[in-house]
Amino acid sequence: MAVDSATHRKTARRLNVAIVAPSMGILGGQAVQAERLVRAWEGDADIHAWLVPINPVPAGLLRLALGIKYLRTIATQLTYLPLLLRELRRADVVHVFSASYFSFLLAPLPAVSVARLFGRPVVMNYRSGEAPDHLKRSAIARRTLRAVERNAVPSRFLKDVFAEYGIDAEIIPNIVDVERFAFRVRDPLRPNVLSTRNFEPLYNVACSLRAFRLVQNRYPEATFTLVGAGSQDESLRQLAAGLDLRHVRFAGRVPPGDIWRYYAEADIYLQTPNIDNMPASVLEAFASGCPVVSTNAGGVPAILTDGVHGLLVGCDDHEAAAARMLALLSDGLLVARLTAAARASCEQYRWTAVRARWVDLYTRMAASVPFRAADGAATEA
């Protein structure tokens, strides 16, 4: 009876969930999903969640180190660790977003260690398309993922990768706001292309530019808008100039609250990554009514079935990507069929559906440890 009483008390109040993730100071898929998740929990009857940023801004003299490459990492860590000690002790559940390689050691691993110190259960929300190589190389990552109470991944792709190493994970997908990314029928479809992937090597935006060159050969009025930034910014601009492309707009970084406008204006969504997981950009295109052409990298085929929700090509194959875009521009019935199926698939990514999965997971995790009062002190059942 004592256990039943404790469980009742835990589920009768709002659970405190610390979400350890990048803030929007690191603009990328993880930061966007974390920001959406924290905002979605605002005012929720069951969950009180808040962000614990892995990239806090140092105070005082430490802030002077932000402009120096390696000192910046040290200053951030010296700020991050005390923040974890202060914030995780008041959580019932610690929800840790995780990338791969060195960032895994800098952000998720310390969060797991501090949560262990306070006896808080951890759900590791691993989100990197580089998981196959990362888990193969890193014994520390494998041990950590096996040791946490739960692993949650956004795609079947990552669940299968984890299973190869005997690590259990459950799928809780990304969120897409189908109200903000409102569906619009494109009839006729115009050669207005959009990409919203950051300018980093794994996203291979150069392949997209080469594909657009072939589209513009057929449709001189075609436009290409690239939303994003990154280490390849200058080289991509030079490539666009070298390909003699016209009507190409580099929009730079766009706040997540405004990016829906670019989908609303576009007609075709194009992405050509070499490595990927479950890109929210594809779901946003689905919700907006843009037909999608993508490489079949990583977890993309888990959310986009070729010929059903969009069109897939092999990695780094710009000719195939161009051919698929040209096929869309010449076949209105194909566009209508693909976009209708893609929009219907978004129902599983609505907040109401995703929320239920997180509440169930958090509740199960909280029930597995002694009840703790709001100040973090354990209370006997």
Image: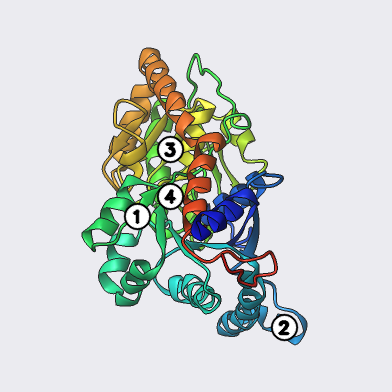
Amino acid of disc 3 = Leu
Q: Are marks 4 and 3 in contact (CB under 8 Å)?
A: no
| Residue kind at label 1, given as amino acid type | Ala
State how far apart marks 2 and 1 are (Cα).
41 Å
Q: Position of residue 11 (x, y in %)?
A: 58, 50
Answer yes or no: is residue 242 visible.
Answer: yes
Q: Secondary structure at mark 1?
A: loop
Q: CA distance from mark 4 to mark 3?
A: 9 Å
Q: Earlier in the sequence, mark 3 or mark 2?
A: 2
Residue wearing tag 3: 270
Circle 3 or circle 1, nearest the eye: 1
Q: Nearer the viewer, residue 313 or 72?
A: 72
Q: Name which residue lies at 45% across and 38% down.
A: 282
Q: Which residue is mark 4?
A: 205
Instruction: Report helix, strand or loop for mark 4.
Output: helix
Name which of mark 2 and mark 4 comes first in the sequence.
2
Farthest residue toward the right?
A: 60
SS label for mark 3: strand
In space, the residues marked 3 and 1 are separated at their CA atoms by 30 Å
Q: Which residue is mark 1?
A: 169
Question: Mark 2, mark 4: which one is toward the viewer?
Answer: 2
Earlier sequence position, callout 3 versus callout 1: 1
Dot 1, crowdedness within 10 Å: few (<14), some or many (≥20)? many
Amino acid, disc 2: Leu
Task: Provide residue 380's location: percent of width, then percent of height.
Answer: 58, 69
